[in-house]
Amino acid sequence: MKGWKKAVGAIAMTTVMATMFAGCGDSKKEAANSNEIKVGALFELTGNVANYGKSCYNGFQMAIDEVNAKGGVNGKKITIVQADNKSEPSESGNQATKLISKDKVAVIVGPATSGCVSAATPVVTNAKVPLMAPVATAPGITVDEKGKVRPYIFRACFTDPFQGKVMATFAVKSLNVKNVAIFYDSSSDYSKGLMEVFGKTLEENGGKVVAKEAFLAKDQDFKAALTKLKAADPQALYVPAYYEEVSKIVKQAREVGLDCPILGSDGWDSPKLAEIAGADALNNTYFSSAYSAQDQDPHVQQFIKDYKAKYNAEPDTFAIHSYDAGLVVAEAIKRAGGTDGTKIADEMAKMKDFQVATGKFTLDKDHNPVSGGIIIEMKNGVQTFKEKINL
């Protein structure tokens, strides 16, 4: 999900922390002899994107509760050790260190945001503890800058380049849009990456980016930039960003007279989007996702039913991907026959056609799931399934 801002400094810090794991072999032996299997839940439970982290934790917890209700894994119950990174990459590295060195977890699920996953990566890699990122979409999560796969990092959702291509394809082929303006967050690698892929794919399909403006996270007044974008007379506006800013952008776009379709990314997915923007402003807006509550697949509908019963709330894409991540992690531990991190990572990498809520889970050579994309349309403040895009 969220971009990699602040992550570079955090990575440097956590690379130093990673040297603390010389005694991890003893920790693994201790974990293997225990009557429980500890799994870390490292999420953004407070801070700027706490909504994401809390949904992730709920979905993950539900999966583990179901596994334990069926007898656990290899005769042992899975115990979740919760950790809060406070929506900060540096704290993500700190908490990953604690989960491994003190709590002795076998696997970590989370964080939600790409920057926080990136910050935890040196820690888990050095300790040889697998990390499953449920909703981190930045392309560099599972492969390094040279394109080499990170052996202990896995992903349960689609990537940013994929969803950027999905939305551009939808714009041209389904909305018959050719001239598009882009409004992106220049402080977010997530937003910048989507902007680039969307623009390239749009042009490859005969479209054109007619205007481009940038904003910064936590900005409040977007009207000057939106007025400039309106002057380009776009057929659609693409805003690859997060609900915190998007909700205000959409509202202000309508106020300055931009009544064209507004397109976005999975960062829009939050109940707060409609609360802040207002239902009317969100009409004629669309965003890319990997999940829709209106998908009639029986596994999706069973997940929704169970989630509502457990939490008295509607699940979102963060919850369902984290649920899937929990099932995959439990299955990998089962197949590995214990808590050895390298064996668990090997089993994750080999995962193929394993049934989860969103479908048959298969990882490609870069530890990314093979999946399609869904377009969500906002109608009167409610998310509705528009169509499925397979590239």
Image (cartoon, helix red, strand yellow):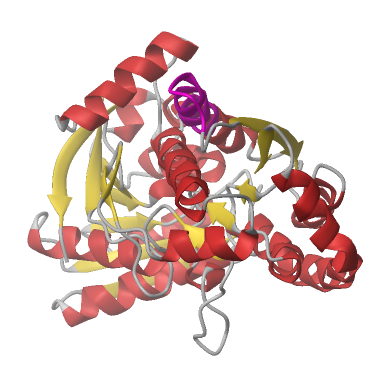
Compared with 296, 147 (above or below) is below
The answer to which of 92 and 364 lies nearer the viewer is 364
* Residue 61 point in image, percent of width and height: 55, 28
Q: Is residue 144 left or right of residue 33?
A: left
Q: Is residue 8 left or right of residue 230?
A: right
Give the image quarter of residue 168. Answer: bottom left
Compared with 69, 326 (above or below) is below
Q: Residue at x 28, y 41 (%)?
A: 358
Q: Residue at x 60, y 66 (%)?
A: 342
Give the image quarter of residue 31. Answer: top right
* Residue 10 point in image, percent of width and height: 80, 65
Total number of numbered discs in the rendering: 0
Q: Residue at x 66, y 32 (%)?
A: 80
Compared with 75, 367 (above or below) is below
* Residue 241 point in image, percent of width and height: 48, 53
| Magenta residue check for 64 | yes
Query: Can residue 212 be seen from the camera position used here?
Result: no
* Residue 304 point in image, percent of width and height: 32, 22
Which span of residues is magenta-colored? 59-72
Query: Can residue 215 be seen from the camera position used here?
Result: yes
| Magenta residue check for 212 | no
Q: Assign the magenta stretch its main secondary structure.
A: helix
Q: Is residue 283 left or right of residue 58?
A: left
The answer to which of 329 and 258 lies nearer the viewer is 329
